[in-house]
């Protein structure tokens, strides 16, 4: 089992920056990748960013590429968000995968999820 706890969400203005953290505990050695997803009210959960262990390769959704950066290690993963826009408003979830893929952009690839942290960007 892997437990994930997100933190760092809040209310910010458009153009501001925010850093989310995800603290992982339990059998973290078994994880192959970590990712961030987000879900806005009335919308489906969508992929944001992922980092794959063993080389630390990353991939991003087109909507956040160039503005968000994922980093960290098997115990803590960060999502640095800059130039925030109102459309970035959502609950942000951290997820851990224990399977092996070339990229990790689908929710079905992840086995463990955190409870989420709310990010609200005002215009």
Image (tube, rainbow, N blue to C red):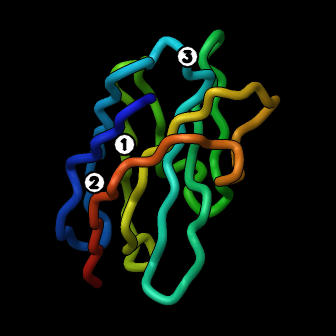
- In the displayed structure, 10 sits above or below 25; it is below
How far across and down, in percent of the image, does residue 110 sit? 62, 42
Q: Which of marks 2 and 3 is in front?
A: 3
The quarter in which the N terminus is drawn is top left
Residue at 63% from the left image edge and 27% from the top image edge: 98
Q: In this view, does 10 lie to the left or right of 81?
A: left
Report if the CB atoms under discs 1 and 2 are less than 8 Å apart: yes
Residue at 27% from the left image edge and 66% from the top image edge: 118
Q: What is the secondary structure assignment of the residue under circle 3?
A: helix
State the separation of the CA atoms marked 1 and 3. Answer: 25 Å
Q: In this view, does 12 lie to the left or right of 25?
A: left
Q: Which mark is residue 80?
A: 1
The residue carrying pointer 2 sits among few (fewer than 14), some (14 to 19) or many (20 or more) residues within 10 Å by Cα, namely some
Residue at 55% from the left image edge and 57% from the top image edge: 64
Q: What is the secondary structure assignment of the residue under circle 2?
A: loop
Q: Mark 2 points at which residue?
A: 17
- Tell me which label, 2 or 3, sits earlier in the chain: 2
Q: Mark 3 points at which residue?
A: 30
The residue carrying pointer 1 sits among few (fewer than 14), some (14 to 19) or many (20 or more) residues within 10 Å by Cα, namely some
């Amino acid at each position: 089992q892997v437990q994930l706890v997100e933190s760092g969400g809040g209310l910010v203005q458009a153009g501001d920056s925010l850093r989310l953290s995800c603290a992982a505990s339990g059998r973290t050695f078994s994880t192959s990748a970590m990712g961030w997803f987000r879900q806005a009210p009335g919308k489906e959960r969508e992929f944001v960013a992922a980092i794959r262990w063993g080389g630390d390769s990353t991939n991003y959704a087109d909507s956040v590429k160039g503005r968000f950066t994922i980093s960290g290690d098997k115990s803590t993963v960060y999502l640095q968000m800059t130039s925030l826009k109102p459309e970035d408003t959502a609950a942000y979830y951290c997820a851990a995968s224990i399977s092996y893929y070339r990229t990790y952009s689908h929710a079905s690839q992840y086995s463990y999820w955190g409870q989420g942290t709310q990010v609200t960007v005002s215009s």
